[in-house]
Amino acid sequence: MAENKPKTATLSFGNKVLELPMMSPVSGPDVIDIRKLYAEGDVFTYDPGFTSTASCSSDITFIDGDKGELLYRGYPIDQLAEKSHYLEVCYLLLYGELPTAVQLDAFETRITRHTMVHEQMHYFFRGFRRDSHPMATMVGVVGAMSAFYHDSTDVNDPWQREVAAIRMIAKVPTIAAMAYKYSIGQPFVYPKNSLDYASNFIHMCFSVPAEDYEVNPILSRAMDRIFTLHADHEQNASTSTVRLAGSSGANPFACIAAGIACLWGPAHGGANQACLEMLREIGTVDRIPEFIKRAKDKDDPFRLMGFGHRVYKNFDPRAKVMKESADEVLGLLGIEDNETLKVAKELERIALEDEYFVSKKLYPNVDFYSGIILDAMGFPTSMFTPVFALSRTVGWIAQWKEMIGDPTQKIGRPRQLYIGASERNYIDVENR
Ligand code: CMC
């Protein structure tokens, strides 16, 4: 029987012809393995923004941007959002399979038992100005966890990696809620372990010691969905940041802090805050054309926040679920008529019909709808990106663990196309 010949790609340049091995994924395009390109061809590849580069192999998450498909460990996101819940999804992302009832119970208990942060951390918060952005506080405090939990910073010890993972999934919501409470001058609220993960976060954000607080189950379900929809997204900017930071052997808390810093930018996780602020700036439906015009103007840096995606060129499957959730939450809270919502609905309608957005395949992304839900729940815009960060923590950790456990892992060290001055001699200051 004839054996299948491994696929190769032929690259010729100058007087060289190189035969490059190719690799086939389970789904998605084949990749050309260029690891020996520099050694054998004395050339680099040039791909700023990594638009055509697979930076690693992974078996965690798959996106088909043309189909608008997102799978966590093979399971479609819409099925998980409807039938599963966040902690089960965390288990799936971390360990590769859906848990049995016993495994899930043990995992939930473990996470729940780690929700409190070291008491000394309360004082650490006090070093921040009250008006600090909660993301700034989170970058600092999550990074500082390496100073509080010394027994889970050895990346070479699988058990310590596991403990660090559990600690972060359990404690990052507590830290995010503390950052919020600190910014509004209210006392920190300790986690309540009788509550589920999402309800506990809502409770830590909105309850005060002076009053009883009941978490609305509808809001808790919506919150859990937001967490699930944001849990992982393969090699996006913040995840790649976590992998790159981790590739040097940096401790897990420092790596996740690096991911939070990257997520903050408005082109990434910061878009949810930027989007709601943009909707408020537009203010009324009659001003939409003015903003659409600006978004199309090449000389104006303005972009419609919450629209477009590097990978999704059909629709963002997360946005589809998030839109349904937004309709549900707003309906149940009876806030269908507010002006921001009217602007959002009309903007969405116009952009989906407008030739510029249609031809460039710019669809509303997950951040377009999540801000609307979080706003309705009572979160200030500055808390939108921290909610994204706490949801994505599990994805970052799963990807970090996968990388550390990969025997072929090396420190990430891209090369460059140098376009600066060529070698020249130093000139003394008096002669310049
Ligand atoms: N408004 C107006 N024009 C846009 C937009 C937008 N939101 N997004 C892209 N374009 C245009 C862009 O000007 C360019 O036009 P041209 O080809 O004529 O120069 C074309 O579409 C392609 O844009 P790009 O910047 O090359 O695409 P990218 O893949 O580098 O950027 C993006 C993807 C998400 C950064 C971008 O669409 C964007 O800035 N969107 C707004 C911010 C946003 O909502 N981000 C959240 C992404 S989803 C959550 C997450 O995963 O973090």
Image (cartoon, rainbow, N blue to C red):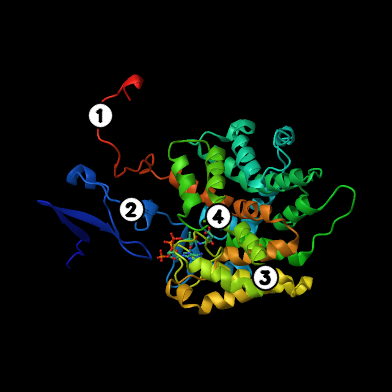
**SS state under label 2:** loop
Residue at mark 3: 326
**Label 4 C-beta lies within 8 Å of the nearest ligand 1 atom:** yes
In this rendering, would 18 be left or right of 30? left
The tally of labels here is 4
- Placement of 99 over or under 345, stated as above or below: above
Residue corresponding to mark 2: 47
CA–CA distance in space, label 1 to label 3: 60 Å
Residue lying at the far left in this picture: please name it. Answer: 15
N-terminal of the pair, mark 3 or mark 2, is: 2
Please tell me whether mark 3 or mark 2 is closer to you in this view: 2
Residue that appears at 21% across and 54% down: 20
Judged by depth in the image, the label closer to the viewer, 1 or 3, is 1
- Could you say where residue 295 lies in the image, as x and y percent from the top left? 51, 66
Q: From the viewer's perspective, is the residue at label 1 or at label 4 nearer?
A: 1
Q: In which quarter of the image is the C terminus?
A: top left
Residue, disc 4 = 266
Q: Do the residues labelled 4 and 3 touch (CB within 8 Å)?
A: no
Q: Nearer the viewer's eye, disc 2 or disc 4?
A: 4
Please state, as top left, top right, bottom left or bottom right, where the N terminus lies in the image. Answer: bottom left
